[in-house]
Amino acid sequence: MNIKAERQPTTSTDILNKYANCMEEIKKRTEVVHGFLRHELHATYLQTTVESICLQIRKILELIALASLVANKSEYEKHRKNFQGDWNAKRILKTLDKANPKFYPIPSEQVISPETGKVVEAIPITSGYLSRADYEDLYDECSEILHASNPFSSVQQEVQSFLDNTPEWMQKIRVLLNHHQVQLIDKRVQLWVLMKAKSDGKVHVYEFMRID
């Protein structure tokens, strides 16, 4: 795909900044999860440690949904007027499906020109990332563990199993977000997001427009 930066961006600086802020918060919460996995942090017991991890992961998932809301705000509010109070990630995703069916982040790898050192192409990543189906499964798993276990239930929480699978879940989230595109409702326009720029280590969000 040939791309160019739009001279007069259609996406406001405020939207780009809000999206970047969501991604920066994801990075902080990711650090906390890895702190638990490296045993630098703990919450005394296995159950409460896993619950603390689940809380951070669920917040990360909510921030992915909220960032997508930010990117599609103008269309989203047509389907949900009082969107300012939205927080339930699965509900946000269902509304986004109506506003922009292609809203979900698209993970990719950058191709750098050896002559200019600039990005000339983004190759889609087709596996190993947190898919939309994975997202919902992980959200449900976290939600289940964050509720107290009913002593009369025949199904008990598998906290050790969740903990064992956490590194794989976090890797999938990393692959999804490390460098990704967000397709806006205007099919010509995408946001390109870099989670950790070489220049300053911060999230950078750019608007690009397709050249037909």
Image: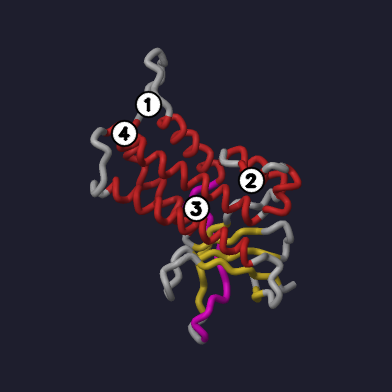
Residue bearing the label numbered 4: 48
The N terminus, quarter of image: bottom right
For residue 157, the mark is 1
Q: Secondary structure at mark 3?
A: loop
Q: Secondary structure at mark 4?
A: helix
**Is the residue marked by circle 1 packed among few (<14), some (14-19), or many (20+) residues within 10 Å?**
some
What is the spatial separation of the Cα atoms under label 2 and label 3, in whole angstroms? Answer: 34 Å
Residue bearing the label numbered 2: 84
Q: Residue at x 37, y 26 (%)?
A: 157
Observer-nearest residue: 187 or 79?
Answer: 79
Earlier in the chain: of badge 2 and badge 1, it is 2
Type of the residue with mark 2: Gln
What is the spatial separation of the Cα atoms under label 4 and label 3, in whole angstroms? Answer: 32 Å
Observer-nearest residue: 173 or 148?
Answer: 148
State which mark lies toward you, 2 or 3: 2
Q: In this rendering, would 191 be left or right of 51?
A: right
**Farthest residue in the top direction?**
152
- Marks 3 & 1, CB-CB < 8 Å contact: no
Q: Secondary structure at mark 2?
A: helix
Is residue 195 magenta-colored? no
Q: Point out residue 65 in the picture as x, y percentages from the top left corner.
A: 57, 47
The secondary structure that most of the magenta stretch takes on is loop
Earlier in the chain: of badge 3 and badge 1, it is 3
Q: Which residues are magenta?
A: 116-131
Residue bearing the label numbered 3: 127
Earlier in the chain: of badge 4 and badge 2, it is 4
